[in-house]
């Protein structure tokens, strides 16, 4: 293998990891606060991507423009994240008392519904708007030409979101309230925190992260039916490898999985789909709670 | 006992329907085999666990049947079914060692991940598996008879019916045996199970192996009826449908899975004719409604009314 391919694989891996981290963060965030594994998170990704692509098409026609692209990413994220996140939160309110696995099935049912909704709105042909990638140009890295968008925007967005979320949870009032509800709901409510509002906000943030991941990915990947299932399983692999509810862990796990995945694309394309699960399986075999979870008492 | 009688009535009804309305014969066999697979899911649901990947055992058994039929032309259909069940049982026993450690979300999602791997592998190695086109199975002889399509299906229908009766009987015996009660205890209180010196993991592993062999049986029958196996059989949507059926039927009695599958298959048949594009939407909404209004499913409702 020559060094060019290696560089390319690493760059691909890092940019993919950036997107993967953002999506997984939404999944792990909702799980951390509400203890619900949101299977419909994959649909948020897909809807975010589709919405961004169609807003982009509608705004630009054929003449492009970087401002329009950025606007379409933001609009797509906000539109999908807030609306779908709130609908999901409202739906799950009816099942609050049910065991977590039934709540998971509810999100699964919602996922099925969204799958058809996507098909009704966007049809089955792939959506692909890559104007922003072309507009931002290429750059030479270690002898390889690479797009600025994938080199700077995707990993950059991931890092910025990582720091914002950390700051938000540790230093803002709202963030501290969320952490309080996560640790002990009863006491937090006793101290005057509105747990219902916190839950709503959690779903909006989680939804925004999922949709933002899709929106960022839409210029480099084409949106096709079935993509939501791939993403939910992939981001579950990241989240499980890291340990459910771990933010820093998710960043590292996304990097590991992203890089190994793109290495395998260049070296052994047949293994591409299997790699994330092999990593997850190996980690879970030795550390059933995930890489970064502080050891808790075993459930059995 | 009432449950077994209900099963016999249901099966007799479906066989009679199949003879009176021959165009319904294939759907009925498919529905019954779905019922077997859903019964496998119900076994795990008794332990409070839901698998989102059990269609992989259906798919695995179906592909085993296809491969063996291709490698040994002239092999008997019944032998093919036995081979399919054996292979999926072995796979279940091996994968079970790994997944029996996990509960709830991890269990469900790990099964989903493994099934996605199988789906992807079958799709990728198209020179061996035929990729997404799948593999054809030419109609084998059945219990020594060389038959036309109609006779073959009749024989298959009878085989399926008999195996459902046997399976229902033995699963009910299993549920009432200590091992079956232990399995239910995983749902109610796993810690106590460990206190009295029972390995919860081993109990759960046994349940997992049973469920995988039931799904395998369903897959093998499915493959023979259809004469074609595709990777779609192992797709997560199929696993979702199986979970749907066992929730619809309820886990109070094995009868639930069978009647759930019947209801599902015919709902699907007519929904597919009337509104193809909204199929998943209907499925999802019904699932939500069942969990909200009838968490026990059909058999739970019947049991409440003391019908079974």
Image: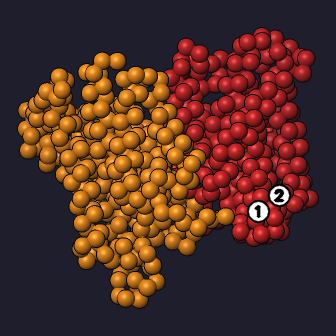
Image location of residue B299, percent across then percent down: 75, 60
Q: Residue at (71%, 59%) from the top-left corner?
A: B47
Q: Is residue A243 left or right of residue B39?
A: left
Q: Where, quadrant-wise, is the C terminus of chain A in this rendering?
A: bottom right
* Residue identifier under label 2: B180
- Foreground pick, B300 / A148: A148
How many marks on residues?
Answer: 2
Q: Residue at (14%, 42%) from the top-left corner?
A: A69
The tint chain B carries is red
Q: Which chain is orange?
A: A
The answer as to whether the residues below labels 2 and 1 share one chain is yes
Query: Would you say residue B89 is visible in this rendering?
Result: yes
Image location of residue A296, percent across then percent down: 54, 66
Q: Residues within 10 Å of mark 2 (few under 14, many from 20)?
A: many
Image location of residue A51, percent across then percent down: 26, 46
Q: Quadrant of residue B130?
A: top right
Q: Where, quadrant-wise, is the N terminus of chain A in this rendering?
A: top left
* Residue identifier under label 1: B184
């Amino acid at each position: 293998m020559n060094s060019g391919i290696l560089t390319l694989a690493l760059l691909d891996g890092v940019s993919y990891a950036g997107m993967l981290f953002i999506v997984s963060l939404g999944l792990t965030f909702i799980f951390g606060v509400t203890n619900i594994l949101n299977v419909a998170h994959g649909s948020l990704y897909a809807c975010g991507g589709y919405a961004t692509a169609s807003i982009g098409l509608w705004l630009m026609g054929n003449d492009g423009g970087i401002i329009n692209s950025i606007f379409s990413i933001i609009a797509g994220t906000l539109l999908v994240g807030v609306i779908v996140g709130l609908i999901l939160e409202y739906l799950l309110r009816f099942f609050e008392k049910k065991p977590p696995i039934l709540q998971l099935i509810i999100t699964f049912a919602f996922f099925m519904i969204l799958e058809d909704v996507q098909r009704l709105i966007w049809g089955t042909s792939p959506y692909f708007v890559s104007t922003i990638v072309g507009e931002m140009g290429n750059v030479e890295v270690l002898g390889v030409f690479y797009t600025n968008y994938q080199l700077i925007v995707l990993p950059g967005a991931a890092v910025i979101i990582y720091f914002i979320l950390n700051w938000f949870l540790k230093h803002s009032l709202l963030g501290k309230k969320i952490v309080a509800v996560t640790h002990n709901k009863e006491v937090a409510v006793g101290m005057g925190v509105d747990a219902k509002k916190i839950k709503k906000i959690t779903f909006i943030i989680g939804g925004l992260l999922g949709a933002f991941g899709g929106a960022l990915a839409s210029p480099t990947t084409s949106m096709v039916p079935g993509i939501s299932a791939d993403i939910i399983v992939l981001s579950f692999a990241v989240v499980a490898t890291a340990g459910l509810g771990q933010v820093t862990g998710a960043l590292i796990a996304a990097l590991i999985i992203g890089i190994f995945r793109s290495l395998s694309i260049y070296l052994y394309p047949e293994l591409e789909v299997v790699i994330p699960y092999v990593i997850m399986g190996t980690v879970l075999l030795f550390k059933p709670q995930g890489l970064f979870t502080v050891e808790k008492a075993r459930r059995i | 006992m009432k449950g077994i009688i209900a099963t016999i009535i249901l099966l007799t009804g479906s066989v009679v329907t199949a003879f009176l309305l021959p165009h319904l014969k294939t759907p009925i066999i498919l529905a019954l085999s779905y019922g077997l697979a859903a019964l496998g899911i119900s076994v795990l649901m008794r332990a409070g666990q839901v698998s989102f990947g059990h269609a992989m055992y259906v798919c695995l058994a179906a592909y085993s049947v296809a491969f063996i039929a291709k490698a040994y032309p002239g092999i008997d259909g019944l032998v093919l079914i036995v081979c399919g069940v054996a292979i999926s049982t072995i796979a279940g026993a091996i994968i079970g060692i790994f997944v029996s450690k996990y509960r709830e979300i991890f269990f469900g999602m790990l099964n989903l991940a493994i099934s996605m791997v199988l789906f992807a592998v079958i799709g990728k190695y198209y020179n061996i598996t035929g990729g997404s086109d799948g593999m054809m199975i030419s109609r084998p002889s059945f219990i020594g008879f060389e038959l036309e399509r109609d006779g073959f299906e009749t024989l298959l229908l009878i085989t399926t019916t008999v195996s459902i009766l046997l399976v229902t009987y033995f699963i009910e015996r299993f549920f009432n045996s200590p091992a079956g009660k232990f399995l239910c205890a995983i749902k109610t209180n796993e810690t106590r199970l460990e206190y009295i010196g029972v390995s919860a993991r081993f109990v759960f592993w046994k349940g997992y192996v049973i469920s995988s062999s039931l799904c395998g049986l369903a897959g093998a029958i499915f493959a023979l009826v259809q004469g074609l196996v595709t990777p779609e059989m192992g797709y997560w949507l199929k696993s979702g449908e199986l979970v749907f059926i066992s929730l619809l039927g309820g886990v109070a009695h094995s009868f639930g899975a069978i009647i759930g599958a019947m209801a599902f298959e015919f709902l699907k048949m007519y929904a597919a004719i009337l509104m193809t594009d909204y199929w998943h939407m209907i499925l999802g909404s019904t699932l939500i409604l069942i969990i909200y209004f009838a968490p026990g499913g059909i058999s739970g409702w019947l049991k409440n009314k003391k019908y079974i």
